[in-house]
Amino acid sequence: MKRVSKDSFVQGFVPDHNHGSVDYTGVADGHVHQCLDVTSPPIQTHDGSHIHYTEGYVMYEDGHFHYYKAYSGPAIVVGNGMHVHYYDFYTSENHGHKHHVKGVDQPAPGNK
C-alpha cells in the first residue's frame, strides 16, 4: 500500500485525508478570536468531488468563546496533485454577538 503524506502529490481522490487551518474570525464587538481547525475525513459528493465537516470552539478571548459547525465547499485543485477547500460560516452567538469566519484551508494530497 502506498503511503500518502502532506508532501505527496497525488492524482485522483485520496480517501483518508483531512485539512487543517489557522485563521482569525472577523471583528465583532471590538475583538477577534483565533480559530484552529482540523476537518473530518472527506465526504464524497454526487459530482465526483468532496467536502469536509468541521466543528469546534474558537480560542477564548474577551471573556468568552464561540462554537461552530460547518461544511467546506468542494475541492479546489491548486496544482501539483494538491487541493484546498473554501469555508465561510458564522460562530454561535455569545455575549450578544457572533463572528464570521471565512478563508481557505491548508492543501492536502489529491486533485479531486
Image (cartoon, rainbow, N blue to C red):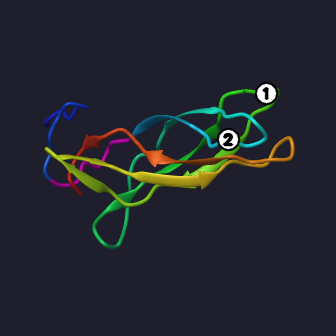
Looking at the image, residue 62 sits to the left or right of residue 4; the answer is: right
Q: Is the magenta stretch mostly helix, strand or loop?
A: loop
In the image, is residue 14 part of the stretch drawn in magenta?
yes
Sequence-wise, the earlier of marks 1 and 2 is 2
Residue 72 seen in this snapshot? yes
Q: Which residue position holds label 2?
A: 27
Residue density around tag 1, few if under 14, some if 14–19, many if 20 or more, within 10 Å: few
Q: Where is residue 103 in the image (x, y as percent from the top left)?
A: 46, 47
Q: Where is residue 48 in the image (x, y as percent from the top left)?
A: 28, 67
Dot 1 falls on a residue whose secondary structure is loop
Dot 2 falls on a residue whose secondary structure is loop
Count of numbered circles in the view: 2
Q: Which amino acid does label 1 sit on?
A: Asp
> What quarter of the picture does the C terminus occupy?
bottom left
Residue at position x 75%, y 34% in the image: 65
Q: Give the range drawn in magenta.
A: 12-18
In the image, is residue 105 part of the stretch drawn in magenta?
no
Q: Which amino acid does label 2 sit on?
A: Val
Height in image: 40 above or below 50? above
Height in image: 69 above or below 106? below
Residue at position x 73%, y 43% in the image: 28
Q: Which residue position holds label 1?
A: 62
Determine which quarter of the picture holds residue 10: top left
